[in-house]
Each structure stands twice: as C-alpha cells, then as structure tokens.
Amino acid sequence: MNIFKRLTAVEKQADDFGFMWSNTGQIFEQIQSECEEIKDNLSQLGDRHHLQEEMGDLIHAVFSLCLFMKFDAEETCVKSIEKFEKRFAELKRLAHAAGFETLKGQPVDVLMHLWTQAKEKVLLNSHSNAPSWEYRFLTQSDIPFIVSAFTTIGWNKPASLYQKYLKEQENDQRCVWVAFKDNDFAGYVTLKWYSDYLPFREQNIPEISDLNVLPKFRKQGIASELLSLVETKGGAKSATVGIGVGLSSDYGDAQKLYVKRGYVPDGRGITHNYQPVKFDDSVRLDDALVLWFRKCLYKE
C-alpha cells in the first residue's frame, strides 16, 4: 500500500474513534516534542532503532498537520521536491559560476551562503520576467567584446588590462567574472587573492577589485550578482573579504551598495595608491584615493 494512503487510513480510523486533534497548536506542540526527543537521542548517542522510531513519529506528526489543514500529503511532498530541485539546480549554477566543480569539503557557511542565494534567485525569477544573465569566468574570446563596450561609452579600458587579468587568473592570482546576455557584455568584477593593500595582505584577506557595470545595465542587480560570486569564492579561503572604495561622487552608488551588503570601513583611514594618507597631507582626488572596507562572511 502507498505510504500516504496507509497514513491517511490510520488517521481516519483515529478520527472516527474520536481520537483527534482540536487545533493546530496541539499538533505543533507534538511536533516540537518529537524534535526534542530526537535531539536527546542524538546527544545521548541513543540506539539507532529508537532514533528511527522517533524520526518516524516526527514524520507522522507533520503528516497529521498536513491532513488537518486539508492538504493532500502526496501533492504537498511533490511540490516540496520540485521546489528543492529548482533551488538545487540554481545552487549548482552559482557554485560553478563561482569556480567550484563540487562543494565537497567546503565550510558549511559557504554551503548556506550559496543556498540562501539560490533561494533568493529562484524566488526573484518566479516573480520577474527579467532576462537571464550569464555569469562566468573571463576567457580570451571575451576581451574584444569588453574593450568595444567600454570604448563605445568613452572609457579607456585597453585589451592589455584584460590580458593581464587573464594571465593572473591562469596563475591563480586573480579570479575574473564577466556578465553577458548572449553577446551583450554588461560588466565584470575581479578578486585578487593577494591584495596590494598591506593590512589585507598581512591578514590573507582577498581583495575585490575593479567592479564595473556598464551604465545602461545598472540597477538590474548585476553588481549584486557579481559580488555574490566573489564573496562565495572568497569565502572558500577566507572568512573575510575586502574592497577599496573611491571617495568621489562617481562612487556614490557603489558606496551605498557595499554598506547595504554589510561592508564596514576597516578603521585605518584612506590611502592613495595603497599608501596611507596622513593628517594634513595633500593628495589628488582620483580613482587611487580610496577608503577600505571589509566584510565578515562567517565566524572562523
């Protein structure tokens, strides 16, 4: 007999005899009680037979709640499985985009970070008709598209820069992610494993560097997606990642984004070309003048 049908039959017999739940609160108490019994058996290293019994009681109690709420139990489980499959597929996509062939051996914080991202992404896609962007590591064939896109908007981004990035990526010194929709380049970000900022380098904090999203693609969540990939990859080697943020108004949106994502100043003031700026110094306000931020991804 199908297990769902058998459970339904058992519940109906109990209900017909008057042995029934009056409200959901009673069932929740039973579920919590079964959870506590399982925890006690786990902590006391109880025998596996008894532990299995307690797990079965928990499943039965949840099943009772499902019936009490007039849900078809089998349909409910199928929906749960389908939801997990969608989230897991997205988790694998995010993991591969972050450079993981497998998640075996990764800290649980990295796993949960990816799972949370996957849940949010699936939920967003279910409520949006936004285009599906492709996020992946930089390749040689991407460079002409990138240079052309920046040339079109008047930004000086020579091919030599991305050749350098690509070589550093091949030497495991830097990771570079690009965002594309078909052949339409939208932006990129890099992660330097060894920062030129001395406090980060001494603490083995990888540095997020050169995050760029083309103006026409901004405010579409692309920068956040790129940052999530960087944080996931960085979290595999370090509990903390860092970034230098420009001080001019051109970096206003970026400054707000980093604060929103949990980045805080490292408390060492500003630097120019990675050198500390001391009180009463005169420096030029350009892209090399930055305030350093860091984000704790998880507790070591």
Image (spheres, grey):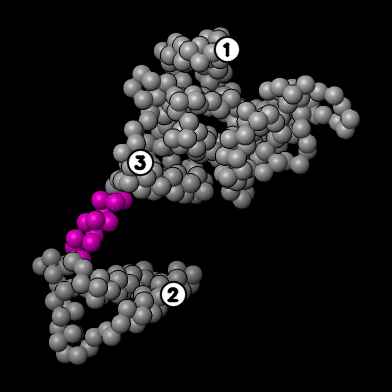
Q: Are marks 2 and 1 in contact (CB under 8 Å)?
A: no
Question: Residue lying furthest bottom in this view?
Answer: 18
Q: Residue at x 59, y 25 (%)?
A: 210
Residue 281, quarter of picture? top right
Q: Helix or strand or loop: what does disc 1 sit on?
A: loop
Of 64 and 290, nearer the camera is 290
Residue 90 marker? 3
> Which residue has dot 1 on it?
156
Q: Disc 3 or disc 1, which is closer to the eye?
A: 1
At label 1, the amino acid type is Asn
Q: Helix or strand or loop: what does disc 2 sit on?
A: helix
In the visual, does 32 lie left or right of 126? right
In the visual, does 62 lie left or right of 154? left
At label 3, the amino acid type is Glu
Q: Residue at x 16, y 90 (%)?
A: 17
In magenta stretch: residue 266: no
Residue 214 marker? none
Residue 270, quarter of picture? top right
Where are the magenta residues, as a range? 73-84
Give the CA separation, mark 2 to mark 1.
62 Å
Residue 230 in percent (x, y) is at: 53, 34
Give the CA separation, mark 3 to mark 1.
35 Å
Above or below: residue 201 compared with residue 139: below
